Amino acid sequence: MFEIVFFTALTFYFLQTVLFIIGVNKKFNRIADDDLPLVSVIVAARNEEENILECLRSLNELVYPEKKIEIIIVDDHSTDKTSEIIKSYVRDKQKFKMIVPKENLKALKGKANAIANAIKIAKGDVILTTDADCTVNPLWTKTLASYYENDVAMVCGFTNQSSLNAFHEMQSIDFIFLLSVASGTMNLGKPLSCIGNNMSYRKNVYHEVGGYENIPFSVTEDFQILMAIHKLKKYKIIYPLEMDGLVTSKPCAGAKALYWQKKRWGVGGLNSDLAGFGVMASAFLVHLGILTAPFIFTANLLYGIAFKFFIDYFFMRDIHKRLNIKMTMKGFLAFEIYYVFYVVALPILLIFDKRVKWKGREYKK
């Protein structure tokens, strides 16, 4: 019975991966440079004194028509030197604006409130968001904006993490793995997730769904706006695999920070639909089987586990190659070990505790 359950789950896992590969390789039309829209880049920053300057410098290097771009930096009531650093940097740069939210729009909290306040003053037809601990490719804005044909409402991009050691690379591979799943499903017409540090959407469509003020509050505000736009059933939502659209974020420094990051994502994932839970269920059962296998060892199980690692490796190797990111075997093996444990542990943990700590604030679902 154990082998039947494991291999059934593994079969679904394999078939899902095939669909992810088909979706992530889908191509989309792009508009001419002369037709690029007016864009507003928004960054919400809270207590990011160690990261914000590097972020600002990368944004200043963006290649985009000067009259068609503005960059709004939101200091979300930082208690460190973030505000001073932003003010000093943007002082003589016309395309930058800095704001501090003066109100909580309809009881919004945290990042969602910061972004909502920025959108209220944004002049762009397309909103792009990234995070204060990120650096962007110089062609990031142009790449995402170039996909805005008339029927496109949202364009998402890939994010990796800077890697100085196996622990960092493990997190980077995890990011790219999860975003490859998001890209694959989204491009096949079934959005399951996205990431707020590399996403964009039309401002008029944002207002059409009521903005963050009128959708359920979540600690994963990016997922909420994605699903609100998807429910309109009127526009295309796409996730092209583009090296020039890459954003690089900072990895979690230690296990505690990584724990809270994963928990926040897990709590946000509780709002998924049946398809999302189906993807999570097959991964949960496969990895639970791997953890249980040493106690019920058979040669067939060993072959099945090896096949699972084979699937993941070649899926990730191709994505990394196309993004021009090096993936080492050490980093991949670290990811696989980490992935086995957290995919099993996270759903169980969320049954008992849905608290989230994020940017010095605590949220309860």
Image (cartoon, helix red, strand yellow):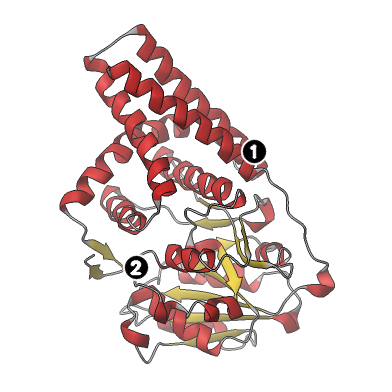
Left or right, 125 with respect to 195, comes to: right
Residue 258 seen from this side: yes
Residue assigned mark 2 = 218
Q: Position of residue 249 (x, y in %)?
A: 49, 57
Q: Residue at x 15, y 51 (%)?
A: 352
Q: Quadrant of the rendered structure where residue 107 is?
A: bottom left
Q: Residue at x 57, y 53 (%)?
A: 158
Who is closer to the viewer here, 164 or 260?
260
Mark 1 closeness class: few <14, some 14–19, many ≥20 residues within 10 Å:
few
Asked if residue 105 is positioned above or below residue 276 in the image, the reply reads below
Q: Amino acid at mark 1?
A: Lys
Residue assigned mark 1 = 321
Q: Quadrant of the rendered structure where residue 322 is?
A: top right
Q: Position of residue 228 (x, y in %)?
A: 48, 68
Q: Position of residue 343 (x, y in %)?
A: 33, 39
Q: Residue at x 28, y 47 (%)?
A: 255
Residue 134 seen from this side: no
Asked if residue 195 is positioned above or below residue 117 in the image, the reply reads above
Left or right, 147 with respect to 357, comes to: right
Quadrant of the image for the C terminus?
bottom left
